C-alpha cells in the first residue's frame, strides 16, 4: 500500500486561536493502520476526510501497513505514535508486560467474514473442512487471521491445520481469490462485498452483525480501537484527547450518516470501481461501528477468552482488563 498522509496546515492553528493556550497547539501524530480502505477502519478515513483531525489541532500522518500486526510492530518499534487496530493487540501486549492501551472503541463487532471459493462450496461447508486449505487473511497475526483460527478451533481443528496467507487489504486480496491462489478468505468489506457480488465466494461466517458475532464468539466482541503506549498517553495527554475527540466526531457522524454519504466522503479509489457496490458494503457494515466509543466488559472478556484459546503462552498469563482500555478520554469526548 502507498503511504498516505494527511497534513493539517496553519489554518488549524489559526482556527483554534481563540481556545485555551494548551488546546490551541497543533500536535503532530503518526497514526498506523493495517489496510486503510477496509471498512473496519472507516472511522479513521472519516476523521481524515471530514477534517476532524484539523478541527482538533492534530497534524495526522497516516501510515498504511496493509495488516494490523504490522501496525502493532510499528508502534512497538517507535515509528508510529498511535494505531487504529484490533483490541486484542492490547491484551497480547499487556500479557507480555508492554503497557499498550486502547483509548477509543471504533467497532463493536469485528465485521469479519469467512467465506469459501465458490467452486469448493460443495466440499468446504464449514470451518471443520478447512484442514489443509489455503486461507487468505490481511496479514498473519491480524484479527482476520485470529478469527479464522478461532473458527477452526471451535470446529474441532487445530489453529495450525491450515496455512494462513497474507493478501493485504486492497485490490490484491480480491485478485488472490479470483486467481485461485487461496481456497478460503477471512476478510472485510469492501473486499468481501466485491467477491460476493461477483459470485466468487460463499459466506460461511459473518460477524458484521450482533447475531453473527455471537454465533462465532458467544458474545459481543469489540473490534477496531485506537490504541497507543501508556507512556505516550502520559507524555501527550492533551494530544491523546485531541486524537480521541476527532474519532468521537467520526463515530457520531457515522451513527446518522447514510451509506451514500459515506461513499461520497471516502476516496473514490475505495469503491474498487463500483460505487453502488461500495454503498451496499457500507450498508452491511454500519451496524458494526461503536455508538459509545467504549467496549462492554462482556465484550472485553470475550476477546480475552479468544486470545487465550489461540495462544497457549497466554493461557496462564494474568491480564487486568482495566489496563487494556483507558476510558477517560472518550468519556470526555462523547460528553
Image: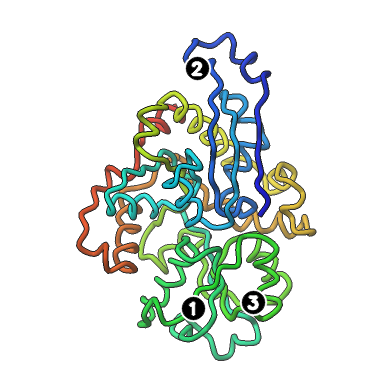
Is residue 199 shown left or right of residue 153? right
Choose the circle earlier in sequence order: 1 or 2. 2
Given residues 40 and 314, the one toward you in this image is: 314
Q: Nearer the viewer, mark 2 or mark 3?
A: 2
Given residues 90 and 97, the one toward you in this image is: 97
Given residues 156 and 69, the one toward you in this image is: 69
Neighbor class of circle 2 (other Cα within 10 Å; few <14, some 14-19, many 20+) is some
**Between marks 1 and 2, how big is the CA–CA gap?**
49 Å
| Residue where numbered disc 1 is placed | 163
Is residue 102 shown left or right of residue 117? left
Classify 185 as above or below 232.
below
Residue at coordinates 60% horizontally, 67% vertically from top-left? Answer: 167
Residue furthest right in the image: 273
- How is the rendered protein coloured? rainbow
Choose the circle earlier in sequence order: 2 or 3. 2
Q: Nearer the viewer, mark 1 or mark 2?
A: 1
Q: Where does the N terminus fall, quadrant-wise?
A: bottom right
- What SS does tag 3 mark? strand
Residues under numbered marks 2 and 3 in contact, where contact means CB atoms less than 8 Å apart: no
Residue at coordinates 31% horizontally, 47% vertically from top-left? Answer: 98
| Residue where numbered disc 2 is placed | 23
| Residue where numbered disc 3 is placed | 201
Residue at coordinates 55% horizontally, 48% vertically from top-left? Answer: 33
Amino acid at each position: 500500500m502507498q503511504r498516505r498522509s494527511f497534513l493539517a496546515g496553519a489554518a488549524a492553528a489559526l482556527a483554534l486561536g481563540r481556545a485555551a493556550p494548551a488546546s490551541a497547539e497543533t500536535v503532530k501524530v503518526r497514526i498506523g493502520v493495517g489496510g486503510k480502505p477496509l471498512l473496519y477502519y472507516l472511522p479513521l478515513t472519516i476523521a481524515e476526510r471530514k477534517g476532524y483531525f484539523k478541527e482538533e489541532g492534530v497534524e495526522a500522518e497516516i501510515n498504511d501497513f496493509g495488516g494490523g500486526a504490522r501496525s502493532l510492530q510499528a508502534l512497538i518499534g517507535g515509528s508510529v505514535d498511535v494505531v487504529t487496530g484490533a483490541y486484542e493487540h492490547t491484551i497480547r501486549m499487556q500479557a507480555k508486560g508492554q503497557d499498550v492501551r486502547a483509548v477509543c472503541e471504533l467497532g463493536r463487532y469485528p465485521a469479519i467474514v469467512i467465506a469459501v471459493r465458490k467452486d469448493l462450496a460443495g466440499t468446504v461447508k464449514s470451518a471443520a473442512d478447512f484442514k489443509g486449505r489455503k486461507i487468505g487473511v490481511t496479514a498473519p497475526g491480524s484479527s482476520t487471521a485470529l478469527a479464522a483460527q478461532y473458527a477452526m478451533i471451535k470446529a474441532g481443528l487445530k489453529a495450525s491445520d491450515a496455512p494462513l496467507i497474507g493478501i493485504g487489504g486492497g485490490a490484491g486480496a480480491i485478485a488472490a481469490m479470483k486467481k485461485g491462489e487461496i481456497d478460503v478468505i477471512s476478510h472485510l468489506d469492501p473486499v468481501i462485498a466485491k467477491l460476493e457480488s461477483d459470485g466468487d465466494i460463499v459466506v460461511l461466517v459473518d460477524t458484521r452483525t450482533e447475531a453473527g458475532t455471537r454465533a462465532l464468539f458467544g458474545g459481543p466482541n469489540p473490534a477496531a480501537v485506537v490504541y497507543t503506549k501508556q507512556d505516550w498517553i502520559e507524555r501527550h495527554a492533551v494530544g491523546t484527547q485531541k486524537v480521541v475527540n476527532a474519532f468521537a466526531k467520526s463515530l457520531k457522524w457515522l451513527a446518522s450518516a447514510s451509506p451514500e454519504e459515506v461513499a461520497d466522503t471516502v476516496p473514490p479509489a475505495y469503491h474498487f470501481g463500483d460505487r453502488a457496490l461500495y454503498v451496499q458494503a457500507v450498508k452491511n457494515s454500519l451496524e458494526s461501528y461503536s455508538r459509545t466509543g467504549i467496549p462492554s466488559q462482556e465484550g472485553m472478556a470475550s476477546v480475552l477468552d479468544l486470545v487465550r484459546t489461540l495462544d497457549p503462552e497466554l493461557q496462564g498469563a494474568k491480564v487486568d482488563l482495566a489496563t487494556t482500555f483507558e476510558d477517560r478520554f472518550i468519556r470526555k469526548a462523547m460528553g
